[in-house]
Amino acid sequence: MSYRVEHCAIVVLAAGMSSRLGNPKQLLIYHGKSLLKHTVDAALQTPMRPVVVVVGANSDAVKKEIKKMEILIEENKGWQEGMASSLRCGLEAVQKKSADVDGIIFMVCDQPYVTQSLLDSLLLAQHETGLPIVASSYEDKLGTPALFHKCFFAELMKLKGDTGA
């Protein structure tokens, strides 16, 4: 089976409450713009579409921050369940919007150093290796952004709680 991703979407997970911080982390300003805008800008600079942003806690304020951007905003009504529900919500939105998507890069909204180049390199690495999952690596750990081939979509839909992919 070929795992080559030809049509990749991006899902930005931005539904968390940021309870430890006390303010919406998505809206924290870094170098003149919100963390969320940094993330969405990087996603929009790639050719990957659709770009879906999953919101939840503080959804009105978060949606207002990105409403003029060329993205699909998906509200996760069950955001309290944890990250898995946002992941499922984003995946469902991508599948409804574009049936030919065969890969998704999942990213979180609080990594302002993620660039278009990094996102493009994930897809390039997937093409070069043929692997169905390609993840970022830092401090000897794998994490987001991470690309998943469609062969994992059904498994991703089974995730529960505060479990990421």
Image (spheres, helix red, strand yellow):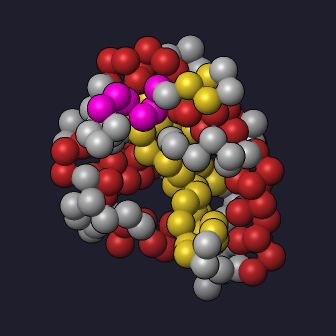
Query: Residue 151's spot in the image, x, y percent?
Result: 49, 73
**Nearest the camera: 127 or 55?**
55
Residue 111, above or below 146 = above
Span of residues in magenta: 22-27
Residue 36, above or below 68 = below
Residue at left 30%, top 32%? Answer: 22
Query: Residue 73's spot in the image, x, y percent?
Result: 43, 29
Quadrant housing residue 156: bottom left
Residue 64, above or below 49 = above
Quadrant housing residue 49: top right
**How many labels sit on residues?**
0
Quadrant housing residue 63: top left
**Nearest the camera: 142 or 129?**
142
Query: Residue 14's spot in the image, x, y percent?
Result: 42, 39
> Is 14 left or right of 29, judged from the image as shown?
left
> Is 159 left or right of 140, judged from the image as shown?
left
Residue at left 45%, top 72%? Answer: 152
Which quarter of the image is occupied by the N terminus? bottom right
> Is 14 left or right of 144, judged from the image as shown?
left
Is residue 135 inside the magenta stretch? no
